[in-house]
């Protein structure tokens, strides 16, 4: 007897190897997945523009990274005594214009360099809604808590979404490795502030546009992350207290399904062991001279060193 409908991720012919580089961009769910890649000690870079939700802004971000196009003073605005880029997350805001620009342009440089060596790209779209900043007639990635009267909200058209996805793919195919694999997901995080009906419409437009566009590219694939949470984990016990964001159990479940479909066997074992090491590193003691604790640390360091011998890139650098 079955009590739930499982959603599986189709096994990939191409596998993520332990030396592969993974670039991710998009909603906060992209960040959660990237965090797990990093905990597994894979080479990952996430969201050089900060969290970005809509296809238009994600395409804009990828284009700037592809062109290594730095930002300049005239592209910033001021609000609440801070210098702000409307293309970026609030984490880039500072009180000094040169600091904001330095933070932004350092990430563009890092992102451009990383993309040139990237084997895998994961793009997570969150919404079809977008805001236009009326004083500049500019479509923005983030409103930075600027009063709503300065913005006009609307749904991106189907053509705008498909064009954005198409241009994103072209730029990634141009800058990344020849055999780069691009994986598209739609975030399972519901944008309830838009309204439940409006959120469903927004997500539906994203799913339709992704499926329509990626048919034209052999290296582009859809990951049913949205469907796993909506149809497989249909229970609020898999959500955080806000009833909107998936909890750690749900994220780990999705990550495990993703790994079974996309990780090479060697990568699975490598990540599994690194997760164990990370758990052990959380252990704290009141007596660091305790012989048992010293022995525990020595054994842990030996495990870390054994893992380091498996890869060329640096791992567990803060330990």
Image (spheres, grey):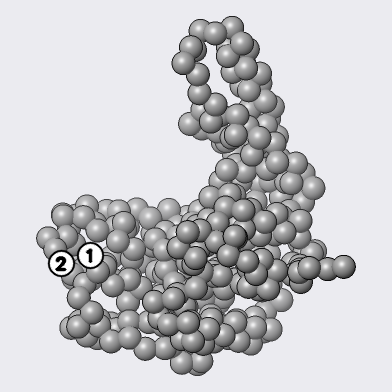
Quadrant containing the N terminus is bottom right
The residue shown at (39%, 76%) is 193
The residue shown at (70%, 54%) is 256
Instruction: Give the image location of residue 59, x and y in percent.
Output: 46, 75
- Asked whether 104 or 316 is in front, the reply is 316
Is residue 64 visible in the rendered image? The answer is yes
Tell me how many marks there are.
Answer: 2
Spatial distance from mark 1 to mark 2, Cα to Cα? 6 Å
Q: Give me the disc on residue 84.
A: 1
Residue 303 as seen in the image, left or right of residue 195? right
- Asked whether 182 or 109 is in front, the reply is 182
Picture layout, residue 40 above or below residue 116:
above
Is residue 109 visible in the rendered image? The answer is no
Picture layout, residue 38 above or below residue 273:
below
Instruction: Give the image location of residue 134, x and y in percent.
Output: 22, 85
User: What element does badge 1 sit on?
Assistant: strand
- Asked whether 270 or 283 is in front, the reply is 283
Looking at marks 1 and 2 on the same chain, the residue that comes earlier in the sequence is marked by 2
Residue 170 as seen in the image, left or right of residue 142? right
The residue shown at (15%, 67%) is 78
CA neighbours of label 1 inside 10 A, class few (<14), some (14 to 19), many (20+): many
Q: Which residue is mark 2?
A: 78
The residue shown at (40%, 81%) is 194
């Amino acid at each position: 007897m079955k009590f739930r409908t499982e959603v599986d991720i189709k096994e990939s012919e191409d596998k993520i190897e332990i030396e592969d580089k993974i670039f991710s961009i998009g909603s906060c769910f992209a960040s959660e997945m990237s965090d797990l890649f990093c905990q597994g000690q894979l080479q990952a870079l996430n969201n050089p523009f900060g969290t970005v939700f809509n296809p238009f802004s994600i395409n804009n971000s990828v284009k700037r990274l592809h062109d290594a196009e730095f930002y300049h003073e005239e592209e910033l605005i001021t609000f609440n005594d801070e210098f702000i880029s409307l293309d970026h997350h609030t984490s880039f805001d500072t009180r000094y214009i040169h600091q904001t620009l330095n933070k932004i342009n350092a990430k563009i440089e890092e992102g451009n360099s990383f993309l040139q060596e990237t084997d895998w790209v994961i793009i997570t779209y969150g919404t079809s809604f977008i805001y236009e900043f009326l004083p500049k007639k500019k479509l923005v990635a983030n409103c930075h808590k600027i009063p709503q009267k300065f913005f006009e909200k609307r749904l991106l058209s189907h053509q705008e979404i498909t064009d954005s996805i198409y241009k994103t793919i072209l730029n990634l195919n141009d800058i990344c490795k020849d055999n780069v694999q691009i994986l598209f997901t739609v975030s399972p995080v519901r944008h309830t502030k838009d309204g439940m009906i409006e959120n469903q419409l927004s997500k539906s437009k994203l799913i339709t546009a992704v499926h329509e566009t990626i048919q034209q590219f052999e290296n582009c694939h859809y990951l049913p992350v949205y469907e796993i949470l909506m149809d497989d984990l249909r229970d609020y016990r898999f959500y955080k207290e806000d009833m909107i964001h998936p909890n750690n159990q749900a994220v780990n479940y999705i990550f495990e399904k993703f790994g079974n479909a996309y990780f090479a066997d060697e990568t699975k074992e490598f990540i599994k062991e690194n997760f164990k090491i990370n758990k052990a590193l959380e252990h704290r003691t009141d007596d660091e001279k305790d012989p048992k604790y010293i022995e525990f640390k020595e054994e842990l360091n030996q495990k870390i060193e054994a893992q380091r011998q498996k890869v060329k890139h640096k791992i567990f650098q803060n330990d």
